[in-house]
Amino acid sequence: MKRKFLGIMGITLCVFLLAGCGKRAATEGTKKSNCSFVQNNMEFKCPAMKEIKDSGEGFFITNKGELYEFANKTYDETNNNCKKIETDIVFDKIIRNTLITNDGKLYSFDGKLKLIDKELEEKGSAFYGLKAMNISLYREYNNMFFLHYFNQNSPVLYGVIEDKSLYVLIKKGNETVKNLIHKFGKGEEILKVTNGYILTDQGYYQYGVTNSSECKKNSDVNCEYGIVKVDTKKNCSDVIFASSDIVVTNDMISE
């Protein structure tokens, strides 16, 4: 699995405290960017990313459902840092690193596409993104998205947006518990939900520590988790896409 991209972190399971902390892949940016989560100013060109819909570690899909691979190298076929994977399969979304087609089939990608069959699903090892519980959640809520994960001893969190409110999904036996954790205001419209980020017309959000300064300073104060505003659209006017794997800026898609 391609886990190295422009300074990718060596720890695959870590805590997102605030924007930019603990990303599995480093973000890209320009020297003009004032975004708090755009950390690096590195050369990266992939015109296809102007149509990016969702991303995994080293690959992304477009609004048309096409699959692309990307890396910190130039592909001979394109002279860019990405290339299209030739396949007739149309993809709808990526949850963590599991590709999901329009008709609900699951695929992994590590340079080659691989169908995750029923036997693998039943073993609960559908790639290292979705597992058996998460597959059942997805099929129950096809608008489910990856929100956040902590470490190996803590639960993965998935969410759904309904009526401008964000709910966390937790499976308990045969029952799905849907907990409300955030409601966006009347004047704020949700534009996009990706792996780890919620983008609105006013800013960018992540699941993180809402009382960060207090719980860091005082060991007696428990850290409280919820939706944290990472930055504003005003500061991030050059950002066209953000996920836990990559942040895409205007300069990255220029020819």
Image: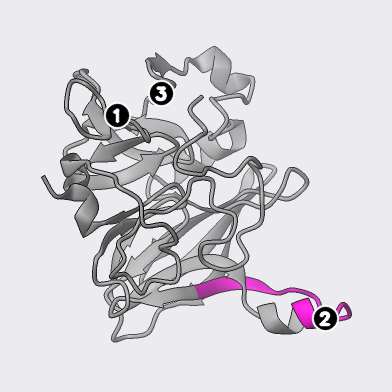
- Residue at 31%, 66% in the rendered image: 31
- Depth check, front residue: 215 or 180: 215
Mark number displayed over residue 107:
3
Region of the chain picked out in magenta, as a range = 216-228
x and y, in percent, of residue 160 in the image: 44, 58
**Is disc 2 placed on a helix, strand or loop?**
loop
Three-letter residue code for mark 2: Val
Q: Which residue is mark 2?
A: 221
Q: Nearer the viewer, residue 4 or 157?
A: 4
Residue in the picture at 51% in, 16% down:
118
Q: x and y percent of residue 214 in the render?
A: 74, 84
Q: Residue at x 28, y 37 (%)?
A: 61
Residue on which disc 1 sits: 103
Amino acid type of the residue tagged 3 in the rendering: Tyr
Question: Viewed as shown, does residue 66 lie left or right of 193?
Answer: left
**Mark 3–mark 2 distance (CA, rounded to whole Å):** 42 Å
- Distance between mark 2 and mark 1 Cα atoms: 46 Å
